[in-house]
Image (cartoon, helix red, strand yellow):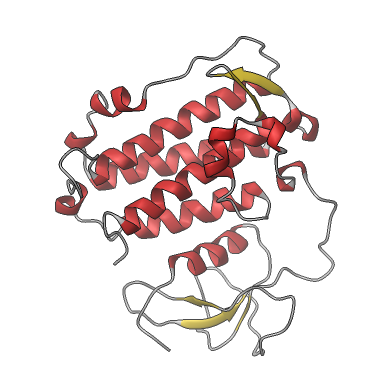
Amino acid sequence: MGTDLDPGALARVFAMWRRNEDLVITNSEPCIFGKPVLFKVCDRKPGWGARIHVGQPTCYHLLNAFVQASPGKESPMSASAVRPAKTEYSPYHEQYISLVPDEDVLVALDQQLAETLILLRSVSEQHGAFRYEPDKWSVKEVLGHMIDTERIQAYRALRIARSDRTPLAGFEQDDYVTHGGFEKRSVASLAREFEQVRRATISLFRNLDPEVWEHRGVANDKEVSVRALAYIIAGHELHHKAILKDKYGLGI
C-alpha cells in the first residue's frame, strides 16, 4: 500500500477496461470504475505488463496490479501499430515521434487522455496562470496550444486521408496563443475541450481503412503521412506534458 497515485498506471488500466479486456489485479477491491473486472491473486510473471499502482484519488486506496489481455485475443498487427518510417515526416517532427512508445498509437492516444485528465485535476486556477518565466506561456496557454495543435494536425490527417492533394499551410503557434483567449478561461474548461478534441482525434483515426494510414500529403511545405500525423499528435502531447511537469510543477 502507499499514498501516491500513478496517473500512467491508472490510464493503462482504464484504457484496457474501456476495451473490455480482462484485468488481472492483486490486492484489489471488488470493483473499479463501477464495472466488474476479473480478479486473480498472482505473482509477477515474464511477459506481463509492468507493475503498476492504481487507486482512487479521493481515498488513496492503492492496488498493486498487473494488466494482461485475455488469452487467445492475438490478431495481426494493425495499421495503427506500425511506426512511421523517417521518410513519412520531416526531421523536425522526430522530437515528437521518438517520444511515442512502441505500441499501437491509438492505444497510446487513449491512455494519454486518461493520464492527462488526471493530471489536470490537480491544477488550481491560480496555478493555471503560472509562468515559470515572464515571457513564457502560462499553464492555460500551454493547454490551449496543445488543443489548437491537435486540431490542426487531425485536420491535416483528415484532408490527406481523403486523398486531398492540396498543399496545407503552416501556422504560427505564438499568434494562435496570443489570440486564443486562454487566460480568460478556467482550467476545467480547457480540460473538457482537450478531452473532446482527443476523443474526436481517436474516432477519426480509428475509423480509417488500413491503406489510408499510408496516404501522404504536403503540410507546411513538408511531406507527411497520415500515420506520421497520428504519432506527431501523440508525441506533441507527451512533449508538452513533460514540460508542464518539469517547468510548471504539475503533478508534484
Q: Nearer the viewer, residue 131 or 108?
A: 131
Image location (x, y in percent) of residue 178: 24, 26
35 to 119, vertically: above or below: below
Q: Quadrant of residue 122?
A: bottom left
Image location (x, y in percent) of residue 1: 43, 89
Q: Is residue 208 left or right of residue 166?
A: right
- Which residue: 59% across, 48% down? 98
The C terminus lies in quadrant: bottom left
Q: Nearer the viewer, residue 97 or 250?
A: 97
Q: Is residue 154 left or right of residue 80?
A: left
Image location (x, y in percent) of residue 118: 38, 60
Q: Quadrant of residue 219?
A: top right
**Residue 252 seen by the camera:** yes
245 to 40, vertically: above or below: above
Image location (x, y in percent) of residue 170: 47, 19
Q: How many marks?
A: 0
Q: Nearer the viewer, residue 83 or 150?
A: 83
**Residue 204 seen by the camera:** no
198 to 63, vertically: above or below: above
Most distant residue in the front direction: 91
Q: Is residue 210 left or right of residue 195?
A: right
- Which residue: 24% across, 34% down? 182
